[in-house]
Image (cartoon, grey):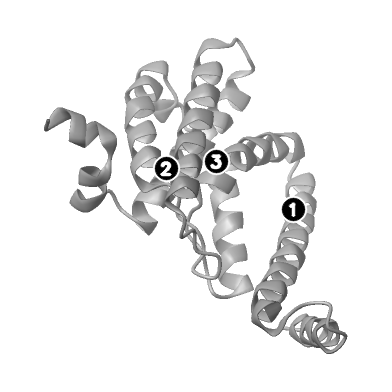
Amino acid sequence: MLIDRPINVLTYHLYKNTLIPHKNIRVMRYGIYVLYSEFVKLAILTIFFSLIGTLNEFLFALVILLLIRPYSGGIHFNSFMGCFLFTIGFFILNVAILPSLNYINNPSLYIVLFPINLLIIFLCSPMPSKHRPIKNKKTKNKYKYLATFFTAAIYTALLLTNIDPTFKAIGLWTINLQAIQLLIGGGVTREKIQKTKLFSILNS
């Protein structure tokens, strides 16, 4: 990718000038790459959804995702293109396609999906990138509970508040798809269930 060379030059310069230790070069390089990639993706997505007239809807979905994804994690890709295609597919689904399908947008379905999503996010979070693993158990639990809390709070607010039906559907499907990608990326395994405090209480 075109950005690789300037990132390598920058990290090498920082290392040569003893601004960062050798062991942190890879972390620094990855951090710069992530910031650049996210900026480019956001710029392209903003232009794309502006052109099709759904910028406000996209921004609404983005805000909801930004409240959950930093703690829950999700599917990660090794290439920018793979990540970009997945991201744009994710937002096209929950902004332009799913909210327009009347037969899957009804209160009964949302209520049924609520506890299912909550359970998936609780069991599968956090799902970090392999480049930034979370090794501390307390941090893992903190992220798990924050992801679950924000999911429950936002989903409940969307169900109970009287907002535009399109935005309500977009918000709910953003959460639904986030839960689905966690399920695909990590899966609700027997091992994960057995590690939860709820499982321990039920079997005590």
Q: Position of residue 101 (x, y in %)?
A: 47, 32
Camera-side residue of 82 and 49: 82
Residue 82 horizontal/vertical position (percent) = 56, 70
Work out how far the residue at label 2 is from the one at label 1, CA to CA, in angstroms: 25 Å
Task: Using the image, tell me which numbered label, if any, was put on residue 48.
Answer: 1
Q: Which residue is mark 3?
A: 94
Crowding near the residue tagged with mark 2, few <14, some 14–19, many ≥20 C-alpha atoms within 10 Å: many
Taking 17 as reference, is 125 left or right?
A: left
Reading the image, the residue beneath label 2 is 179
User: Which label lies toward us, 2 or 3?
Assistant: 2
> How many other residues sit within 10 Å of disc 3, few (<14), some (14-19) or many (≥20)?
many
Quadrant that contains the C terminus: top left
Quarter occupied by the N terminus:
bottom right
Indicate the amino acid at tag 3.
Answer: Asn
> Does dot 2 land on a helix, a strand or a loop?
helix
Cβ–Cβ under 8 Å for marks 3 and 1: no
Determine whether the residue tagged by mark 1 lies in a helix, strand or loop.
helix
Residue 113 lies in what quarter of the image?
top left
Q: Residue at x 73, y 47 (%)?
A: 49
